[in-house]
Image (cartoon, rainbow, N blue to C red):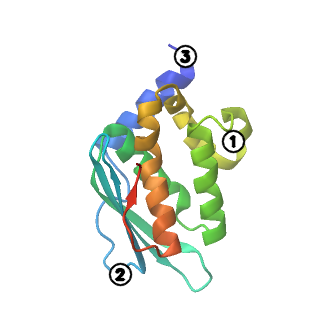
């Protein structure tokens, strides 16, 4: 097994067992729901925007597989404190990474430790698990009212 694969597995297990920023955000300005009918992941993303347009807090809740939960956990860590435009850019970069449109070495400077999810591209059915939190975050950021679906 490669070092990247080992790291990927360790990161997934750590964030799945101890998700960061899990739970409701009582004073959220924006909310969105996401659903992956293929594997049953259901996720809610709530965020609060500051006066300067930055994400002052972001949390997630719901039930998802290990990849979805780990992705959501790392997403909240990565996007907390970012300006809305920067957060949106990182969401798009992450999606490009896991769908194979961008190589890990090209994304490392921008995405940091999120590059461990590059291995998901080898399992196309799991790409939707990894990207669901990110699509749901973007829906919340944009104030979309309809639930996000991976189908």
Is the Cβ of the residue at disc 3 closer than 8 Å to that at disc 1?
Answer: no
Task: Return the disc, 2 or 3, that comes first in the chain's sequence.
Answer: 3
Gap between marks 2 and 3 measured at Cα:
43 Å
Left or right: residue 66 compared with residue 107: left
Q: Position of residue 29 (x, y in %)?
A: 42, 81
Q: Position of residue 36 (x, y in %)?
A: 34, 48
Q: Which residue is situated farthest in the bottom direction here? A: 51
Rendered view: 109 above or below 4: below
Q: Name the residue under label 3.
A: 2
Rendered view: 106 above or below 138: above
Q: Where is residue 67 in the image (x, y as percent from the top left)?
A: 38, 39
SS assignment at label 1: helix
Gap between marks 3 and 1 measured at Cα:
19 Å
For disc 1, the neighbor class at 10 Å (few under 14, some 14 to 19, many from 20) is some
Task: Return the disc, 2 or 1, that comes first in the chain's sequence.
Answer: 2
Q: Where is residue 102 in the image (x, y as percent from the top left)?
A: 68, 38
Left or right: residue 94 compared with residue 44: right
Residue 83 visible in rendering: no
Gap between marks 2 and 1 measured at Cα:
33 Å
Q: Which residue is drawn at 50% across and 23% down?
A: 5
SS assignment at label 2: loop
Q: Name the residue under label 1.
A: 107
Rendered view: 108 above or below 9: below
Q: Quadrant of residue 107?
A: top right
For disc 2, the neighbor class at 10 Å (few under 14, some 14 to 19, many from 20) is few
Task: Return the disc, 3 or 1, that comes first in the chain's sequence.
Answer: 3
Left or right: residue 133 compared with residue 38: right
Q: Quadrant of residue 53?
A: bottom right
Q: Name the residue under label 2.
A: 27
């Amino acid at each position: 097994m490669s070092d990247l694969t080992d790291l990927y597995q360790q990161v997934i297990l750590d964030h799945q067992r101890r998700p960061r920023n899990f739970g409701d955000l009582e004073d959220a300005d924006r909310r969105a729901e996401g659903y992956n009918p293929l594997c049953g992941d259901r996720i809610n993303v709530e965020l609060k925007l500051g006066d300067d347009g930055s994400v002052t807090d972001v949390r997630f809740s719901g039930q998802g597989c290990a990849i979805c939960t780990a992705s959501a956990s790392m997403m909240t860590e990565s996007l907390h404190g970012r300006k809305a435009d920067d957060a949106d850019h990182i969401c798009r970069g992450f999606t490009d990474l896991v769908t194979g449109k961008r190589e890990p070495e090209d994304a490392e400077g921008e995405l940091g430790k999120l590059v461990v999810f590059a291995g998901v591209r080898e399992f196309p059915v799991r790409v939707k698990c990894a990207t669901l939190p990110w699509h749901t975050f973007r829906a919340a950021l944009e104030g979309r009212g309809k639930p996000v679906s991976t189908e």
